[in-house]
Image (cartoon, coloured by chain):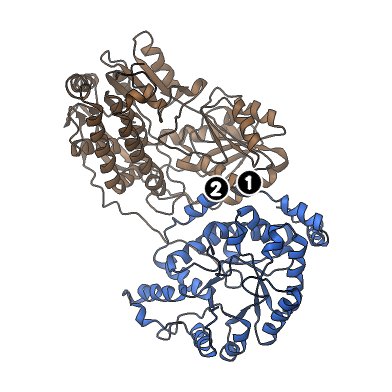
């Protein structure tokens, strides 16, 4: 895992050419001890982040939010309002930074694009028959191309969990490669749906598989199954991107999504990033939160820190 | 981007430290002859004056314990003793923040550990043994096991209140009374515990606390009125105690030094193993008798494990014990710091490679940076002698048999760790290790239900669990 020689780098790019090579590699990764990983995650959760450090963490977290709405009931008006909020999360405070991206279904992309045009806020869209991924490959690729054509510069795809759990790694790999190609210049985030992978060993293997296939980001969850992002799962994924960079020289981002609802939780994730992969990942280019309600709590805590008073939810815009 | 944690100090206002303390004898604080100072090892600031008990003070304490045993505690039904122990456990929980802050002030350990490890375990021990007090006939030692009488208990400075709990809780549950001597550098939580005994209305004389140094301890264990001696500390003192009580009929348990092997096989879960190595040796500044002070790592993964270990060590936050983000606190005393320095210098002089992460140590107080030695052989002093500090010796092995041979090649036998993804290899290795506690894919885990104790020069007898009752029963 610490090999950084050129030969090691070229070796890894060959892995995707054969099912056997992929399997041998993925199953040869060091295991994850469940108790130990959960204990480490819990320990990092006891860090006490106060005063200046808290202020710094809150602004960073706001910049890392992928402000998300993925409902059947989404309307053009609703996503436009969300995009406006992404640009100016706190209309009362011009020093408040904008969020990282807005994340919507492909059909909503054009409406968001209108609002975000010319800004630094990215436009992410879930594609590939999100959230189940249960559609033929050409449909998934068409979904991806349509989202990119409509203005998305980031694509959140789902992996084929059925194929992964059945051990058909080549199939999962090839789908990611094809989606990456369909993305063109858009960044590809690969959703592992860790809640369905069940074990940390699987999370580590799926992380490596997604990175080997060219994913720019690995993301925990769709938010549509009961278990979404957790601290231990994110820890295992952070260890994977750290080891992947050591082996290949390529840096991959991480996005926990779903279930991160308040500032306290978000800060725990930032502490984990800080103490697992370090400052190189403490940037919206390399770490994002997939969340919706998190933003308002961050804004409330930010206001509390700057003004000393804690305002109620009525003082912040609803999404 | 850099993410610096702002200082997050725990307030020390919660604890009132008196300017001087007497001895706790027969339910009251009484004055003794000599006073000495106890200091905060992180700042060298004097915390309080403490009385050093002389021979006569010890005699008074033993007589008070005898009287309480004969008149009150011995005849009391187990269910009533249990009530007192449950009450003490609850008060410990209620006052845990106060006790944790005091422990960190007097000992130098980080508040994160005193708050999250020491205090929860202290309360757990009292709760656990409270449960045994009325069930002794079912403990497997016969229908009516009897207490021994007066127990003399001498405890070390590394886990002051936790070692008190390990000693006092089973002794009282079994029906004994105690005279306890805390270590001279860390007497304050024991004295606060004395106040808790008063608060719990524990009958006078059941718990007596005499502070002092080696002379006080010797007077206590050699006192003819004592029926049982329990000691945790150095092997050297343990041997002296064993000699002094030989032929007296006193029952003895000794929990002494260690030089534990932490064995990492090539199929280990590496990230968790690294956490376990760090927890094994840097927990409590390495002031742990069962610390994993010898890392035995399989040669084919040694480089990878060491790289990961160094990366992890660079993240350890060394400094103010009361800061909630501190991982490694102060060395407990100047004397202990000198000992750690001497052995570390010997390691470098004998040819091992020394490495510490860049780390700024405070100017005042007693500090030692987390350190590892690589290229260590079995012949080096750092591989043989207990350092009792944040210093890890790294050795390699090629086969499981070699790992076991090296792990057992020590006069000690307190604990060991095994890291592998293969269950059969855990069992194979554990069967062959001569150590009282073997942890698999974890390290430094403690629980009141689990017996703890050593082989060889690590002592004899067990503390904790059902087994821990045996040391305080006439069986």
Quarter location, residue B410 = top right
Residue A167: % across, % down: 73, 57
Task: Return the residue at label 2.
Answer: A36
Q: Is residue A19 above or below residue B25?
A: below
- How far across and how far down the image is residue A20, in percent? 81, 54
Q: Residues within 10 Å of mark 1 (few under 14, many from 20)?
A: many
Viewed as shown, does residue B68 lie left or right of A185? left
Position in image of residue B234 (x %, y %): 44, 25
Judged from this view, the residue extending furthest toward the top is B247
Q: Which residue in the protein does label 1 denote?
A: B269
- Give B252 or A196, whichever is nearer the viewer: A196
Asked whether the beta carbons under mark 2 and mark 1 sit within 8 Å of each other, the answer is yes
**How packed is label 2: few (under 14 Cα within 10 Å), some, or many (20 or more)?**
many
**Residue at (56, 46) in percent of width and height:** B275
In what element is the residue under mark 2? helix
In the rendered image of this protein, does residue A140 appear above or below residue B24?
Answer: below
- Left or right: where B268 falls relative to B187: right
* Residue at the image point whose x is 52% and y is 75% from the top: A63
Q: Colour of chain B?
A: brown
| Residue at left offset 76%, top offset 64% | A171
Name the element at disc 1.
Answer: loop
């Amino acid at each position: 895992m610490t090999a950084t020689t050129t030969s090691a780098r070229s070796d890894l790019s060959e892995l995707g050419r054969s099912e056997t090579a992929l399997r041998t590699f993925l199953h040869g990764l060091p295991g994850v001890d469940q108790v130990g990983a959960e204990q480490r995650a819990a320990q990092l959760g006891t860090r006490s982040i106060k005063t200046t450090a808290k202020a710094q963490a809150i602004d960073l977290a706001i910049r890392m939010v992928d402000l998300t709405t993925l409902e059947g009931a989404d309307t053009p008006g609703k996503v436009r309002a969300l995009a406006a909020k992404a640009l100016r999360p706190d209309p009362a405070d011009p020093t408040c930074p904008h969020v990282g991206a807005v994340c919507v279904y492909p059909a909503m992309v054009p409406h968001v694009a209108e609002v975000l045009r010319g800004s630094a806020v990215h436009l992410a869209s879930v594609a590939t028959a999100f959230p189940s991924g249960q559609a033929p490959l050409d449909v998934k690729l068409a979904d991806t191309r349509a989202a990119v054509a409509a203005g998305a510069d980031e694509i959140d795809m789902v992996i084929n969990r059925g194929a992964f759990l059945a051990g058909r790694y080549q199939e999962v790999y090839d789908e990611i490669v094809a989606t990456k190609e369909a993305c063109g210049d858009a960044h590809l985030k690969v959703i592992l749906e860790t809640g369905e992978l069940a074990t940390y060993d699987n999370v580590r293997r799926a992380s490596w598989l997604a990175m080997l296939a060219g994913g720019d980001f690995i993301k925990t969850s769709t938010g549509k199954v009961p278990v979404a992002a957790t601290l231990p799962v994110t820890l295992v994924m952070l260890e994977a991107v750290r080891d992947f960079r050591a082996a290949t020289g390529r840096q991959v981002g991480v996005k926990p999504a779903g279930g991160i609802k308040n500032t306290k939780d978000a800060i725990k994730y930032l502490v984990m990033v800080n103490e697992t992969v370090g400052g190189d990942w403490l940037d919206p280019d390399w770490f994002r939160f997939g969340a919706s309600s998190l933003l308002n709590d961050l804004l409330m805590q930010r206001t509390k820190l700057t003004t000393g008073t804690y305002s109620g939810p009525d003082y912040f815009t609803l999404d | 981007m850099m993410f610096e944690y702002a200082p997050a100090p725990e307030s020390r206002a919660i604890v009132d430290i008196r300017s001087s303390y007497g001895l706790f004898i027969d339910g009251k604080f009484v004055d003794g002859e000599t006073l000495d100072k106890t200091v905060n090892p992180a700042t060298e600031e004097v915390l309080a004056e403490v009385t050093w008990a002389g021979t006569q003070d010890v005699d008074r304490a033993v007589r008070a314990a005898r009287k309480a045993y004969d008149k009150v505690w011995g005849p009391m039904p187990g269910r009533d003793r249990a009530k007192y122990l449950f009450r003490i456990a609850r008060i410990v929980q209620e006052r845990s923040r106060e006790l944790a802050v005091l422990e960190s002030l007097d000992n130098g350990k980080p508040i994160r550990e005193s708050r999250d490890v020491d205090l929860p375990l202290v309360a757990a021990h009292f709760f656990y043994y409270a449960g045994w007090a009325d069930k002794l006939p079912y403990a497997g030692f016969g229908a009516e096991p009897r207490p021994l009488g007066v127990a003399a208990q001498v405890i070390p400075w590394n886990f002051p209140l936790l070692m008190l709990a390990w000693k006092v809780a089973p002794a009282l549950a079994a029906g004994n009374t105690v005279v306890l001597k805390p270590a001279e550098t860390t007497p304050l939580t024991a004295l606060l515990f004395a106040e808790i005994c008063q608060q719990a209305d524990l009958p006078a004389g059941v718990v007596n606390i005499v502070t002092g140094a080696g002379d006080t301890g010797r007077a206590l264990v050699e006192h003819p009125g004592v029926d049982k001696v329990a000691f945790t500390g150095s092997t050297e003192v343990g041997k002296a105690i064993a000699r002094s009580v030989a032929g007296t009929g006193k029952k003895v348990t000794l929990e002494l030094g260690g030089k534990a092997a932490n064995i990492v096989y090539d199929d280990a879960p590496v990230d968790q193993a690294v956490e376990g190595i760090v927890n094994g040796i840097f927990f409590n500044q390495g002031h742990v008798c069962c610390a994993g002070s010898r890392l035995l790592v399989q040669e084919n993964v040694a480089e990878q494990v060491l790289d990961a270990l160094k990366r992890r060590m660079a993240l350890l936050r060394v400094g103010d014990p009361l800061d909630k983000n501190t991982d490694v606190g102060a060395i407990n005393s100047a004397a202990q710091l000198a000992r750690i320095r001497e052995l570390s210098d010997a390691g470098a002089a004998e040819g091992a490679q020394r490495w510490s992460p860049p780390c700024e140590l405070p100017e005042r107080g007693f500090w030692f940076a987390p350190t590892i030695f690589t290229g260590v052989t079995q012949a080096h002093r750092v591989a043989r002698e207990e350092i009792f500090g944040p210093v890890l010796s790294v050795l390699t092995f090629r086969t499981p048999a070699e790992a076991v041979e090296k792990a057992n090649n020590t006069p000690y036998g307190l604990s060991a760790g095994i890291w592998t993804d293969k269950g059969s290899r855990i069992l194979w290795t554990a069967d062959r290790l001569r150590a009282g506690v073997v942890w698999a894919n974890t390290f430094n885990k403690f629980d009141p239900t689990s017996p703890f104790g050593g082989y060889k020069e690590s002592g004899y007898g067990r503390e904790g669990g059902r087994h821990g009752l045996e040391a305080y029963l006439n069986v």
